[in-house]
Image: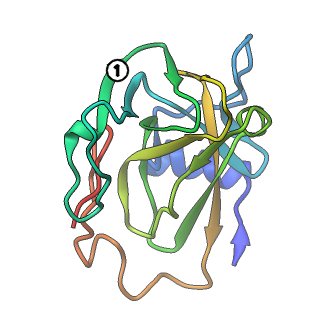
Amino acid sequence: MAILSDRWIRDAALNQGMIEPFVEAQRRDGCISYGLSSYGYDARVAPEFKIFTNIDSTMVDPKDFDPKNFVDRETDVCIIPPNSFALARTVEYFRIPRDVLVICLGKSTYARCGIIVNVTPLEPGWEGHVTLEFSNTTPLPAKIYANEGACQFLFLQGNEPCETSYADRAGKYMGQKGVTLPKL
């Protein structure tokens, strides 16, 4: 399995629609960087957030998720309470080729502030907006900046196309748009 370069990512994004919208090079311009890097793509977080709250004393249950577990915010700056959690999504829409697996890592700018970004691997054949999970591990409120870099995607090419892709098995998160909650 090989990690794929900026040339390969650019070609797949521009000619196969793998990443839309696609930003050709790293953008910094006074913000947390995003766009194409040497061996990855730094995606942006959209201005839609679901911030977890205990106002209604609900329980988080992945088999029976209660929408009262969070408050919705559409904002340029999301404040995550201390030791709390928020869901968001990428600005970019991804279409993963059948012979590629994508791993996501949080950006060091957020990690150095105690903010952890978690994303499960993007499987071959999957497409959609990526739901991002932000954990504020600090005892202080933490800011997430919309339309700026949030995480880096690394593209790994398998030795051959997979036998059964995410699309083939009609995965439950296929084609997701917006922030997507847990499904059974």
Please give left or right for residue 104 compared with residue 79 in the image: right
The residue at 69%/16% (across/down) is 31
Look at the picture and state if 64 lies above or below 49.
below
| Residue with the most extreme bottom position | 163
Look at the picture and state if 157 lies above or below 30.
below
Look at the picture and state if 158 lies above or below 77.
below
Q: Which quadrant of the figure has residue 123?
A: bottom left
The residue at 36%/55% (across/down) is 127
Q: Which quadrant of the figure has residue 174?
A: bottom left
Residue 15, percent across and down?
48, 47
Q: How many marks?
A: 1
The residue at 27%/52% (across/down) is 175
Please give left or right for residue 24 compared with residue 68 in the image: right
Residue 116, percent across and down?
64, 44
Camera-nearest residue between 42 and 109: 109
Q: Which quadrant of the figure has residue 87?
A: top left
Look at the picture and state if 22 lies above or below 118.
above
Under mark 1, the amino acid is Arg
Residue 64, percent across and down?
19, 59
The N terminus, quarter of image: bottom right
Camera-nearest residue between 25 and 102: 102
Camera-nearest residue between 49 and 107: 49
Residue 60, percent across and down?
32, 53
Q: Dot 1, crowdedness within 10 Å: few (<14), some or many (≥20)?
A: some
The C terminus, quarter of image: bottom left
Q: Secondary structure at mark 1?
A: strand
Residue position marked by numbered label 1 in the rendering: 73
Please give left or right for residue 60 compared with residue 137 in the image: left
| Colour mapping | rainbow
The residue at 50%/30% (across/down) is 45
